[in-house]
Amino acid sequence: MADSDYEDFTEYEFIGASGNSAFDCMVIGHRSRIDTPFSASELESWIIRFEPSATTEGNVSTVFDYGDTSWLTGLWRSLEGPVYVSNAEGIVHIRKDFKKKKGQAAWKEVQLEAQLFGIWGLSDTCVFTWGKAGGKHVMFRFDGKKWNPMPSPEDVSVLHGLSPDLLYAVGPDGTMARWDGQAWKSVRIAAKSHFTGLFVAGPDEMYATTEAGELWEGTSHGWSKRAEAEDSLWDVAKYKGEVWAAGGEQGLLKLKGKTKKLECIKPNVEATAFDARNKLLITTNEILVETDDGANFKGVGRDALRKFRENEPPMWED
């Protein structure tokens, strides 16, 4: 098969950027077959770094830090720089130093006894990863030195919180739980479908989204449905007083004031994930977008993975 023929059935997408901004972040990029259902055995996963540059076009350089045929399932980068990536084969990839001398290993790999499906952190001494082992749900916490097992709620899709004793986890079938530092406590919520996004804005202000397009708002006293989109919502974040929702093909959505309505702010920004710690960093399938005021938007990385790999046979064919 000619190299160009691979493009007839190959698709590329970004998965969950994390960092200070679109011009200073890292993201997972997947290359997979478009003509068959998703398969972890027919996949390329790449860790891609975008960093400020005074010499390259768009003032950003693109570095393909790591790539192989394993399924990289999640990425979180601390604002200090280190990055943590989970792997479905139970490996956590860690890179702390981006100025390593030639010959030094850039990435450290830690093998945990589990399939890992996601990763997220509060700091470089408080990083969580989760998955399954022996048919049971498991979770580990990194304290800066080692990964320690900890209790896990039911199946986890997203984890978010404010401190080690104030965490929420959501997952399939309306699963939600709160961690108080000692134990997970189930939270009852009448969601229609799987949770997709979660954001803890304060001890008494939380938001969650579902595949059914629901935007839920929670307090310490309970949760209620705040708004509903026409199609699936994929993530939620509160940034500078505004609540944003990732609407996929519906575009970038925002909760309209104190109403129960979501309005489309950028129909051409098909948002799938957020990082709202510094700039509002927005992931779409093919481009990373940032804003610091909700009015002006900048994008980088369009077709970066495609341009890098389109003339190369898929790694899974080797």
Image (tube, rainbow, N blue to C red):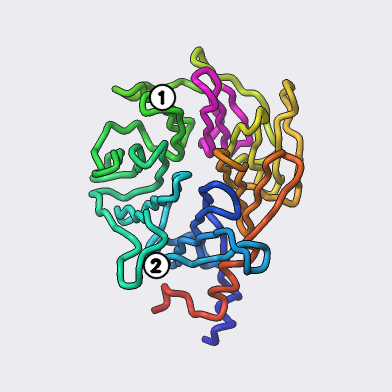
Q: How many marks do you count on the picture?
A: 2
Residue 255 falls in image quadrant = top right
* Residue 278: % across, % down: 57, 40
The range drawn in magenta is: 190-217
In the rendering, which numbered label is found on residue 69? 2
Residue 161 vs residue 223: left or right? left
Residue in the image at 31% along x and 33% along y: 152
Q: From the viewer's side, name the closer residue of 4 and 173.
A: 4
| Marks 2, 1: nearer the viewer | 1
| Mark 2 Cα-neighbour bin, 10 Å: few <14, some 14–19, many ≥20 | many
Place of residue 105 in the rendered image (x, y in percent of width and height, measured from the top left): 31, 66
Residue at x 49%, y 79% (from the top left corner): 313
Which residue is pictured at 54% across the width and 34% down the height? 193
Q: Which mark is residue 48?
A: none
Q: What secondary structure is the stretch in magenta mostly built from?
A: strand
Q: Is residue 145 above or below residue 100?
A: above
Q: Secondary structure at mark 2?
A: loop
In the rendered image, is residue 140 in sight? Answer: no
Residue 132 drawn above or below residue 44 = above
Q: Nearer the viewer, residue 126 or 44?
A: 126
Q: Can you give x and y, in whole percent of width and height, for residue 194 in the image?
A: 51, 37
Residue at image mark 1: 166
Q: Is residue 199 magenta?
A: yes
The three-letter amino acid code for the residue at tag 2 is Thr
Going from N to C along the chain, the mark reached first, 2 or 1, is 2
**Element marked by disc 1:** strand
What amino acid type is highlighted by mark number 1? Answer: Leu
Please identify the quadrant where the C terminus is shown. Answer: bottom left
Q: Looking at the image, which residue is at 57% across and 39% down?
A: 276
Residue 26 appears left or right of 86: right
